Amino acid sequence: ASSAHHWVATGEVQWSWEEAPVMCGLVADARARAGTKFGSPRILNTGSGPLAPPPLDCGQHGSGDLGVVPVFATDGLARFYLKVFDELSIRPPQVSVQCPVEELRACFPRNYFDIAHMRNALDHTMDPLEGMRQMLEVTRPGGWALLRHARNEGSPGRFQVGLHQWSFDALKQADGLHFFVWNPVLRADATKWLLDHGYASEVRTELRPHPGRTEADDETEYIWVDIQKPL
């Protein structure tokens, strides 16, 4: 509740666990690889929830050439958030666009964003593989799709609690750590799928301590996946 009040008052929200300089650095990396032929810098925060993030001022974080980078927020439930704002007489500083991750290509042009970012939301979707493909469709060549999710979050509730339809895991394979998507009816090596289909040129998977963990759940892990789109 306190973060929501802060967002309404200031427009600020911690939508990414990355440090701002890291995010700006990834935008600069994408633009260095693809050039400027795809337009100005842009970031997509899909599955944003009701608290849509503000623009990212990369000029304050060592990337002065980028200036203020707009952040486009989308969510498959955005129309319901708008209704709640009206019912509670809230004037949100930013709002999300109604667009499920599986339909991003219907909402934005191809090759439009330098970064497509999703945190704790892809495991809520009907089709997470299609969601990843759509994120890469709207990302520029050389750009990045970033996934930040709690490890196996759907499992404790047997995929029946809240919106959790899937669990995500990171498992060691012969060539390193792979990102897996699974539930009781399907198990997919997403790293192999992305590379084999040519959707990605590189997939980096890492296990980290949960950024929001407390002493009560200090074993909770977070899966960080960085997916680079081929040039």
Image (spheres, grey):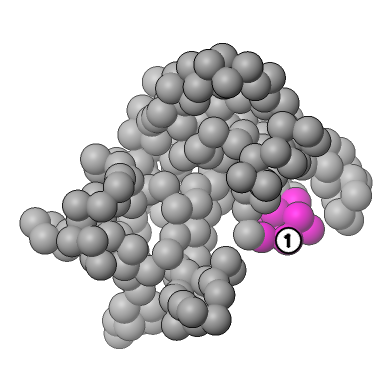
Report whether 95 appears left or right of 145.
right
Q: Position of residue 217 (x, y in %)?
A: 46, 77
Confirm whether the magenta stretch covers residue 19: yes
Residue at horizontal 23 percent and vertical 61 percent from the top: 157
Residue 225 versus residue 104 in the image, above or below: below
Q: Give the range drawn in magenta.
A: 18-26
Residue linked to disc 1: 19
Residue at horizontal 50 percent and vertical 52 percent from the top: 119
SS class, disc 1? loop
Report whether 82 appears left or right of 55.
left
Residue at horizontal 80 percent and vertical 36 percent from the top: 10
Residue 13 versus residue 29 in the image, above or below: above
Confirm whether the magenta stretch covers residue 121: no
- Asked whether residue 53 is in view, the answer is yes
Residue 185 versus residue 58 in the image, above or below: below
| Prevailing SS of the magenta stretch | helix
Q: Which of 86 and 197 is in front in this view?
A: 86
Q: Position of residue 169 (x, y in %)?
A: 32, 70
